[in-house]
Amino acid sequence: MEVFIFLLAALFSVLNPIGTVPIFVGLTQDYTKVERSRVSLWTAINVFIILIISFFIGQYVLKFFGITIPALRIAGGIIIASSGFSLLNGRFNKNKGINKKVEEEIQSRNDIALTPLAMPMLAGPGSISLLIAYYQEHNTTLDIIYSCMAILVVAFLIFIILRSAHYLARILGTSGIVAISRIIGFLTIAIGIQYIISSILSIIRGT
């Protein structure tokens, strides 16, 4: 159960679906309620598929390129911490690859569930590297079951949050969303730094 709780908290912090609310509202302002629900559902499904594939297949990609787990954890820790700093500084969306030009192109698309919502806004390098490294240390049958459950719950939470995005935006307001995002950002920085520390200690100990 500890595996489930830790991975759930880590993924939710790194993905930060609450920080995506303002962008989702902006991209779907001309959508009907049914269309918003459909986009929310498919975004959650796409995120789930991306994370599951990363969790199970990512290790083989590492072996192919000869990347060690400590190196991945350090790189992932830097990316995760960087995302956290971006949240604290209010520049998260920019670092997620959403600029004005991309946003204008998105407006003309019929389906935004995969790009940019699922990737790179939600399932980005931080969450992918987190899952790859996590699998290396928690690969027993029970751990895998709990990890898959955590990914499923995160995807469900993304669906609920995005489906309620327009209501949340009205209730919390811009300042409320920013405040929550910055709290999540602080936790994200802590997770990233912990990954870096653990990797360095692992290298020193030769494990």
Image (spheres, helix red, strand yellow):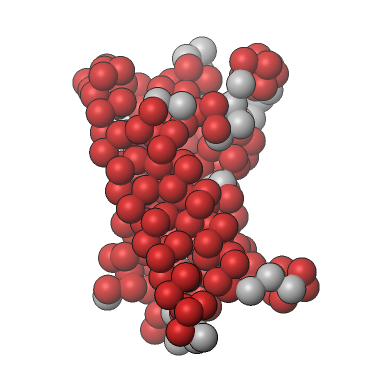
At horizontal 33% and vertical 73% (from top left) the residue drawn is: 3
x, y percentage for residue 183? 26, 38
Q: Is residue 201 above or below residue 195?
A: below
The total of numbered circles placed on residues is: 0
x, y percentage for residue 86? 44, 34
At horizontal 68% and vertical 16% (from top left) the residue drawn is: 101
Quadrant of the snapshot with the N terminus:
bottom left
x, y percentage for residue 204? 48, 79
Quadrant location of residue 95?
top right
Q: Is residue 170 left or right of residue 90?
A: left
Quadrant location of residue 193?
bottom left
Q: Is residue 139 left or right of residue 177?
A: right
Visible in this render: residue 96?
yes
Q: Is residue 126 above or below residue 206?
A: above
x, y percentage for residue 36? 47, 27
Q: Is residue 4 above or below residue 118?
A: below
At horizontal 67% and vertical 22% (from top left) the residue drawn is: 102
Q: What is the residue that sits farthest to the front in this orientation?
A: 204
Front residue of 115 and 28:
115
Visible in this render: residue 160?
no
